[in-house]
Image (cartoon, rainbow, N blue to C red):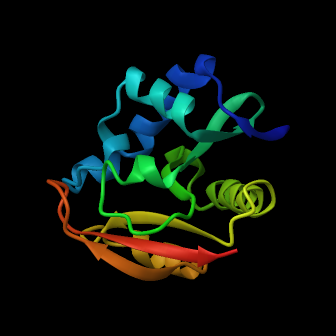
Amino acid sequence: MAEVIRLATLTDAPRILKLTHRAYESIRELGLDFPAASADLNMVENNINLNRCYILLIDNVIISTVSVAKAESVRKVIDYPYDFPFIWWFATDPSYERKGIGGRLLDEVEAIIRRDLQASAVTLATSTRHPWLIDMYKRRGYELVFESEKGERGNSVILKKNL
């Protein structure tokens, strides 16, 4: 079983879109308006072009993806008072949940952010209405640092992890 983590290319976009739709099904069922939950191919391609979109493949099948955005991109979507890299569009194939795959990808991306971007911290956001994501990120060392009420998406929290 060959596992590879690399930056996504535009040729990966259709497979990333399928993965994201499967992974965000529960988000849609909760009625949360995460942009990735209703993404189309153009949005995925823009994400790949504008951000650092990483994928984890097993035997050439995309199993997990996560993107790292710049602060100015994030400010277009939520109140964001920081200049740290921002993690978003994190998704793992539901058939691989609870196997550590997404965690391995996130660990590697956090290491890349520390090493290549020389950032001292990383941030991410989620909805206050999600039943378990905040706790999951807290277990990974993230701390709640900001709550936003911007936009139609309702309240969101920003969590930060020192690297």
Count how many numbered circles sit on residues in the image.
Answer: 0
Q: Which residue is nearer to you in this view: 72 or 12? A: 72
Which residue is more in the foreground, 37 or 59?
Answer: 37
Closest to the observer: 131 or 114?
114
Q: In which quarter of the image is the N terminus?
A: top right
In the depicted structure, whether residue 49 falls above or below residue 11: below
Q: Where is residue 114 in the image (x, y as percent from the top left)?
A: 75, 64
Residue at 18% in and 53% down: 31
Out of 28 and 128, give the one closest to the viewer. 128
What residue do we see at 52% from left, 50% from top? 70
Which image quarter is the C terminus in?
bottom right
Query: Is residue 77 shown left or right of residue 42?
Result: left
Q: Position of residue 79 (x, y in %)?
A: 30, 63
The outermost residue toward the left is: 152
Q: Position of residue 47 (x, y in %)?
A: 49, 34
- What residue is drawn where x is 44% and y is 45%? 23
* Residue 152 image offset from top left, x and y in percent: 14, 53
